[in-house]
Amino acid sequence: MNNNIWIPLLISSLAGLSTLLGGLVVFMKFKDRDGFIAFAISFSLSVMMALSVLELIPESIKDITEAYGFAWAMMVGIAVFVLGRIIVIKINMKIALLHKESSLYRVGILSMIALMLHNFPEGIATFMTAYNDLSVGISLGIAIMLHNIPEGISISVPIFYATGNRGKGLLYSFISGLAEPLGAVLAYIVFKRFISDVTIAIVLIFVAGIMITLAIEEMMPEVKKYKKRKQSIIGFVLGVVLVLVNLIIF
């Protein structure tokens, strides 16, 4: 690796591992445990849905449309989105069969898998952007860092409250964040010549399908179990606001 790639790699790594900052929330103590869980999961699912609907899907459809036309973009987008949905359902069935832990634990594991898949192409995008234009890459890295913090929360909180193990919650957040520098390294070593806006767009629509399905079919039912309407609404609204602020600034 030449000297020109170390800074882009550092930017990708810091952006990805910011999930740890979100994971640290497990070391905070809350009087209303159920209220905090409802808030955290509502916040996380709103971030996933808003990120998918407001950024990943529209930007990806735009990139595919520019290359192949709107009709082709819609067909590919729908097919890949549905594939993401099917993957979540299949993985959830496997987890349910292999593990007898609570549904809260499943939410944490599925969140980790979904966000690893999300962070991988993000790592590629951040690295390639910073490699070509450092100033733009830094801005993108900061934006990704900001929305990776709540992603860390979405993994660590359900894992911790399902297992009682803070270290496990933090570890799983860390593993999710590692996908970003891994994507950066593979982008440079293996995929550099094959990466295009269209391939990244297809992957991100697939990820959006996973995250929206996870949010609606796993996280929403989990939130309802705690019967904390006020905390759930506050968490949901704050998640959407965070994504909107992130999009406006960056």
Image (spheres, rainbow, N blue to C red):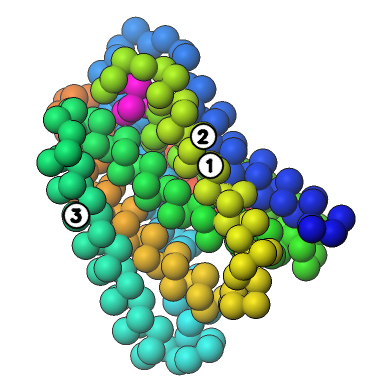
Place of residue 198 in the rendered image (x, y in percent of width and height, measured from the top left) = 52, 78
Residue 136 drawn above or below residue 119: below
Instruction: Say whether residue 34 is left or right of residue 173.
Output: left
Q: Residue at x 36, y 17 (%)?
A: 165
The residue lying toward the viewer, choosing from 185 and 7, is 185
Name the residue carrying label 2.
174
What is the crowding at mark 3: few (fewer than 14 residues within 10 Å), some, or many (at least 20)?
some
Disc nearer the start of the sequence (1/3): 3
Q: Quadrant of residue 106?
A: top left
Disc nearer the start of the sequence (2/3): 3
Q: Are marks 1 and 2 in contact (CB under 8 Å)?
A: yes
Q: Is residue 39 visible?
A: no
Give the distance between the C-alpha atoms of the residues marked 1 and 2, in whole angstroms.
5 Å
Q: Amino acid at mark 2?
A: Phe
Q: Residue at x 14, y 30 (%)?
A: 100
Place of residue 179 in the rendered image (x, y in percent of width and height, measured from the top left) = 52, 48
Which element carries disc 3, helix, strand or loop? helix
Q: Is residue 160 visible?
A: yes
Q: Which residues are magenta?
A: 157-161
What is the crowding at mark 1: few (fewer than 14 residues within 10 Å), some, or many (at least 20)?
many
The residue lying toward the viewer, choosing from 135 and 123, is 123
Q: Amino acid at mark 1?
A: Gly
Mark seen at residue 177: 1
Place of residue 90 in the rendered image (x, y in percent of width and height, measured from the top left) = 19, 55
Q: Main secondary structure of the magenta part?
A: helix
Give the distance between the C-alpha atoms of the residues marked 2 and 3, in whole angstroms.
24 Å
Q: Amino acid at mark 3?
A: Ile
Q: Which corner quadrant holds the C terminus? A: bottom right
Q: Residue at x 37, y 47 (%)?
A: 113
